[in-house]
Image: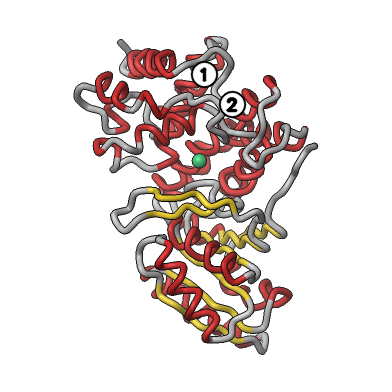
Amino acid sequence: MYRIQGPGAYLQGPDLINKMGELVSPLGKKFFVVAGGTAMKRYKESIEKSIREQGLECVFARFGGQSTAAEAERLSALASEAGCGAVIGIGGGKVIDSSKLTAHRLGLPMIIVPTLASSDAPCSSLSIVYDEHGAVSDVVQLGRNPEMVIMDSRVIAQAPARMLACGMGDALATYYEARVCFENGFPNAIGSAVPLTGIGLAKLCCDTLYEHGLAALEAVERNEVTLPLERVIEANTYLSALGFECGGLSCAHDFQDAVSVLEDCHACYHGEKVAFGTLCLLAVENRPEEEQSRAMEFCRRAGLPVTLAQIGLKENAEQKLRSVAHLLCRRGAAPNSPPPGVDANMLIEAALEVDRRGRGA
Ligand SMILES: [Zn+2]
């Protein structure tokens, strides 16, 4: 069986936040809006206004700062007390995770309004739960994707360029990881064989990054909404999410998950570690030289890491990588499927080789 799933609707364009009321009106009458401090300050007034203009109601809740089980419980209690019929989450990754979990607990439609294009999480059916210290404690499979994702490209144009680059790093892995699953008959991230849609969207995602990635970064540096930026926002947020859920994951995410345990890598974002992991995947698979150097050059020019020092491993890198080897290439530990015949030791050797190349050594 093939399984294909994605968000009910994906809307993207400049100034959509000002039209929120009209956009979300098919999904409810009273909305519970979860927002972090910055989003609250910037967008509360315009969201409230546009929702009221449609004759609808909304109640705002300030996000507590960490996507813990207790936070989802607190938000769920507030939403049901207020009698809300749908949840809107506006902000970065953790607000999104918490809002998804809240909507899921209450069985309400979830509407996600990301303020960054830094990963493919907004459109996915996963919610990451953290403990109060910020360590990942659970990855909840919600079994459904958000009913609606609203991506305001003006908001993304005003966010830091580094965050767009992070999203490009996460999206760069999508095709190369899906290819491992597609070519070897491994399952995708939602437990089915990889359909053509999975590998096709993943390839489109990859081609879009190479074509428009650097121009999109320049647009964000100027805070301008341009066609290349629109293309890359779509690749980072939508194509990459469908690409990984329907296409499957492999060593790039395995690498990111393992090094995330190391204190040294905490200042580095998900997409940055995934980008380096992608270079390791291509190296361990012995892909053609042209393909490997294209990916490395792209990362270098986008400001994504090409050395171990750039992901935080400045000293004793090899020893530290070996200390997390037990987390790498665990066969059958879906959703990350390593290429056939590849083990943790080979992936670490590949990381050291990528690092040598990245340093020009
Ligand atoms: Zn990712």
Residue extending furthest toward the front = 332
Q: Is residue 276 visible?
A: no
**Quarter of the image containing the N terminus?**
top right
Going 38% across and 43% down the picture, which residue do you hit? 269
User: Label 2: few (<14), some or many (≥20) within 10 Å?
Assistant: many
Say whether residue 125 is left or right of residue 97. Answer: right
Q: Nearer the viewer, residue 206 or 344?
A: 344
Whether residues under marks 2 and 1 lie with C-beta atoms below 8 angstroms apart, the answer is yes
Residue 307 at what x, y percent from top left? 33, 24
Q: What number is the disc on residue 176?
A: 2
* Between discs 2 and 1, the one toward the N terminus: 2
Residue 178 at what x, y percent from top left? 63, 30
**Quarter of the image containing the C terminus?**
top left
Helix, strand or loop at disc 1? helix
Q: Which residue corresponds to mark 1?
A: 282
Residue 354, by quadrant, is: top left
Kind of residue at disc 1: Leu
Q: Is residue 308 visible?
A: yes
